[in-house]
Image (cartoon, rainbow, N blue to C red):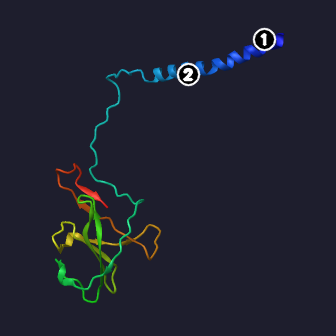
Protein backbone atom coordinates (compact mmCIF):
# COMPACT_ATOMS: atom_id res chain seq x y z
CA UNK A 1 0.00 0.00 0.00
CA UNK A 2 2.88 2.46 0.20
CA UNK A 3 2.45 2.81 -3.51
CA UNK A 4 -1.19 3.99 -3.18
CA UNK A 5 -0.21 6.51 -0.53
CA UNK A 6 2.44 8.05 -2.75
CA UNK A 7 -0.04 8.34 -5.64
CA UNK A 8 -2.55 10.13 -3.42
CA UNK A 9 0.11 12.60 -2.23
CA UNK A 10 1.06 13.55 -5.82
CA UNK A 11 -2.63 13.97 -6.69
CA UNK A 12 -3.03 16.45 -3.79
CA UNK A 13 -0.01 18.44 -5.01
CA UNK A 14 -1.47 18.58 -8.50
CA UNK A 15 -4.71 19.99 -7.12
CA UNK A 16 -2.89 22.56 -4.97
CA UNK A 17 -0.61 23.88 -7.76
CA UNK A 18 -3.23 26.17 -9.45
CA UNK A 19 -4.20 27.67 -6.07
CA UNK A 20 -0.56 28.35 -5.14
CA UNK A 21 0.16 29.81 -8.58
CA UNK A 22 -2.88 32.11 -8.26
CA UNK A 23 -1.80 33.37 -4.82
CA UNK A 24 1.75 34.05 -6.05
CA UNK A 25 0.45 35.90 -9.14
CA UNK A 26 -1.89 38.07 -7.04
CA UNK A 27 0.95 38.93 -4.66
CA UNK A 28 3.21 39.91 -7.58
CA UNK A 29 0.49 42.12 -9.10
CA UNK A 30 -0.22 43.78 -5.76
CA UNK A 31 3.44 44.55 -5.23
CA UNK A 32 3.71 46.12 -8.71
CA UNK A 33 0.68 48.37 -8.19
CA UNK A 34 1.85 49.86 -4.93
CA UNK A 35 2.13 53.67 -5.13
CA UNK A 36 5.62 55.01 -5.56
CA UNK A 37 6.36 58.15 -3.60
CA UNK A 38 7.87 61.01 -5.59
CA UNK A 39 10.93 62.78 -4.36
CA UNK A 40 12.23 66.28 -4.92
CA UNK A 41 15.21 64.94 -6.87
CA UNK A 42 13.13 63.01 -9.46
CA UNK A 43 13.64 63.91 -13.13
CA UNK A 44 11.34 66.60 -14.53
CA UNK A 45 10.41 66.82 -18.18
CA UNK A 46 9.51 70.17 -19.72
CA UNK A 47 8.46 70.61 -23.31
CA UNK A 48 5.57 71.07 -25.71
CA UNK A 49 3.47 68.84 -27.90
CA UNK A 50 4.13 69.14 -31.63
CA UNK A 51 0.78 70.08 -33.17
CA UNK A 52 1.73 68.80 -36.62
CA UNK A 53 -0.13 65.65 -37.60
CA UNK A 54 1.67 62.83 -39.40
CA UNK A 55 0.10 61.36 -42.55
CA UNK A 56 -0.90 57.73 -42.52
CA UNK A 57 0.87 56.35 -45.58
CA UNK A 58 -0.21 52.76 -44.93
CA UNK A 59 -3.92 53.20 -45.63
CA UNK A 60 -4.24 54.46 -49.20
CA UNK A 61 -7.45 55.44 -50.99
CA UNK A 62 -7.99 54.84 -54.67
CA UNK A 63 -9.23 57.83 -56.64
CA UNK A 64 -10.16 57.70 -60.30
CA UNK A 65 -9.21 60.77 -62.32
CA UNK A 66 -11.31 61.33 -65.45
CA UNK A 67 -10.57 63.70 -68.36
CA UNK A 68 -11.52 67.30 -67.56
CA UNK A 69 -12.28 69.24 -70.72
CA UNK A 70 -14.41 72.21 -69.61
CA UNK A 71 -11.93 74.52 -67.85
CA UNK A 72 -14.59 77.24 -67.54
CA UNK A 73 -15.99 75.40 -64.49
CA UNK A 74 -12.83 76.10 -62.48
CA UNK A 75 -10.89 79.34 -61.99
CA UNK A 76 -7.11 79.38 -61.58
CA UNK A 77 -5.16 82.08 -59.74
CA UNK A 78 -2.28 81.45 -62.17
CA UNK A 79 -3.37 80.39 -65.69
CA UNK A 80 -2.35 76.90 -66.83
CA UNK A 81 -0.03 76.23 -69.74
CA UNK A 82 -1.81 75.38 -72.94
CA UNK A 83 -1.39 71.79 -74.05
CA UNK A 84 -1.43 70.34 -70.53
CA UNK A 85 -3.32 67.12 -69.96
CA UNK A 86 -5.89 67.71 -67.17
CA UNK A 87 -7.88 65.07 -65.31
CA UNK A 88 -10.22 65.51 -62.33
CA UNK A 89 -11.27 63.52 -59.31
CA UNK A 90 -12.58 64.11 -55.79
CA UNK A 91 -10.69 63.60 -52.54
CA UNK A 92 -12.37 62.45 -49.35
CA UNK A 93 -13.08 65.29 -46.92
CA UNK A 94 -13.13 63.92 -43.35
CA UNK A 95 -14.83 67.05 -42.02
CA UNK A 96 -17.84 66.63 -44.33
CA UNK A 97 -17.53 62.80 -44.47
CA UNK A 98 -17.79 62.64 -48.25
CA UNK A 99 -15.67 63.03 -51.38
CA UNK A 100 -16.08 66.78 -51.74
CA UNK A 101 -12.65 68.20 -52.61
CA UNK A 102 -12.28 68.81 -56.34
CA UNK A 103 -8.79 67.70 -57.33
CA UNK A 104 -7.12 68.26 -60.68
CA UNK A 105 -4.09 66.38 -61.94
CA UNK A 106 -2.24 68.65 -64.39
CA UNK A 107 0.43 67.06 -66.58
CA UNK A 108 2.37 69.66 -68.60
CA UNK A 109 4.23 68.35 -71.65
CA UNK A 110 7.80 68.90 -70.46
CA UNK A 111 7.40 69.34 -66.69
CA UNK A 112 6.64 67.27 -63.62
CA UNK A 113 2.93 66.73 -62.90
CA UNK A 114 1.19 68.83 -60.24
CA UNK A 115 -1.95 68.37 -58.22
CA UNK A 116 -4.49 71.11 -57.51
CA UNK A 117 -6.93 70.57 -54.64
CA UNK A 118 -9.71 73.07 -53.91
CA UNK A 119 -9.25 72.90 -50.12
CA UNK A 120 -11.50 75.84 -49.27
CA UNK A 121 -14.21 74.66 -51.73
CA UNK A 122 -14.52 78.11 -53.32
CA UNK A 123 -14.17 76.90 -56.92
CA UNK A 124 -10.81 78.66 -57.41
CA UNK A 125 -7.49 76.88 -57.55
CA UNK A 126 -5.18 79.25 -55.66
CA UNK A 127 -1.40 79.04 -55.67
CA UNK A 128 -1.42 77.59 -52.13
CA UNK A 129 -3.68 74.77 -53.39
CA UNK A 130 -1.03 73.56 -55.86
CA UNK A 131 1.05 70.54 -54.80
CA UNK A 132 4.15 69.15 -56.48
CA UNK A 133 4.12 65.42 -57.10
CA UNK A 134 7.39 63.64 -56.33
CA UNK A 135 8.49 60.08 -56.99
CA UNK A 136 7.95 57.57 -54.20
CA UNK A 137 10.81 56.44 -51.94
CA UNK A 138 11.69 53.49 -54.17
CA UNK A 139 12.07 55.79 -57.20
CA UNK A 140 9.39 54.06 -59.28
CA UNK A 141 8.87 56.32 -62.35
CA UNK A 142 5.13 55.51 -62.41
CA UNK A 143 4.33 56.30 -58.76
CA UNK A 144 4.12 59.87 -57.44
CA UNK A 145 3.32 61.16 -53.96
CA UNK A 146 2.03 64.38 -52.42
CA UNK A 147 0.83 65.28 -48.93
CA UNK A 148 -2.15 67.61 -48.76
CA UNK A 149 -3.07 69.19 -45.44
CA UNK A 150 -6.69 70.14 -44.87
CA UNK A 151 -7.18 73.22 -42.70
CA UNK A 152 -9.21 72.57 -39.56
CA UNK A 153 -11.46 75.15 -38.01
CA UNK A 154 -10.30 75.90 -34.44
CA UNK A 155 -13.57 74.74 -32.85
CA UNK A 156 -13.35 71.28 -34.40
CA UNK A 157 -9.91 70.31 -33.25
CA UNK A 158 -6.95 71.66 -31.37
CA UNK A 159 -4.60 70.75 -34.24
CA UNK A 160 -4.02 73.13 -37.12
CA UNK A 161 -4.15 70.66 -40.02
CA UNK A 162 -5.43 67.25 -41.05
CA UNK A 163 -3.09 65.22 -43.27
CA UNK A 164 -4.54 63.09 -46.05
Distance Cα–Cα, label 2 vs label 1: 27 Å
* The image quarter in which residue 23 lies: top right
If you read the primary sequence from the N terminus, does the residue marked by circle 2 or circle 1 appear first? 1
Q: Is residue 81 left or right of residue 14?
A: left
- Single out the residue that lies furthest toward the bottom: 83
Image coords of residue 69 (percent x, y):
26, 86
Residue closer to the observer: 137 or 163: 163
Residue identifier under label 2: 22
Q: Which numbered disc covers residue 70?
A: none
SS assignment at label 1: helix
Foreground disc of the pair 2, 1: 1
The quadrant of the rendering that contains the C terminus is bottom left
User: Which residue occupies the foreground of this view, 72 or 7?
Assistant: 7
Residue located at (28% from left, 37% from top): 46
Neighbor class of circle 2 (other Cα within 10 Å; few <14, some 14-19, many 20+) is few
- Whether 143 is drawn above or below 35: the answer is below
User: In which quadrant will I find the N terminus?
Assistant: top right
Q: Residue at x 18, y 68 (%)?
A: 121
Q: Is residue 70 left or right of residue 28?
A: left
Residue 90 visible? The answer is: yes
- Pointers 2 and 1 in contact (CB under 8 A)? no
Answer above or below: position of 25 versus 145: above
- Image coords of residue 141 (percent x, y): 44, 76
Q: Nearer the viewer, residue 17 or 133?
A: 17
Disc number for residue 5: 1
| Nearer to us in this view, 73 or 161 | 73
Q: Residue at x 38, y 21 (%)?
A: 35
Res. 78 visible in picture = no
Amino acid sequence: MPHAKRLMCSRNLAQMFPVVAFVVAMFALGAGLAPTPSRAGDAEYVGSLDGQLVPNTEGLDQIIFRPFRDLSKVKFATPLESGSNITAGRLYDPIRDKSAILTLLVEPEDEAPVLYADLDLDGTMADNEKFQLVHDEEGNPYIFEATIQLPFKPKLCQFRNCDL
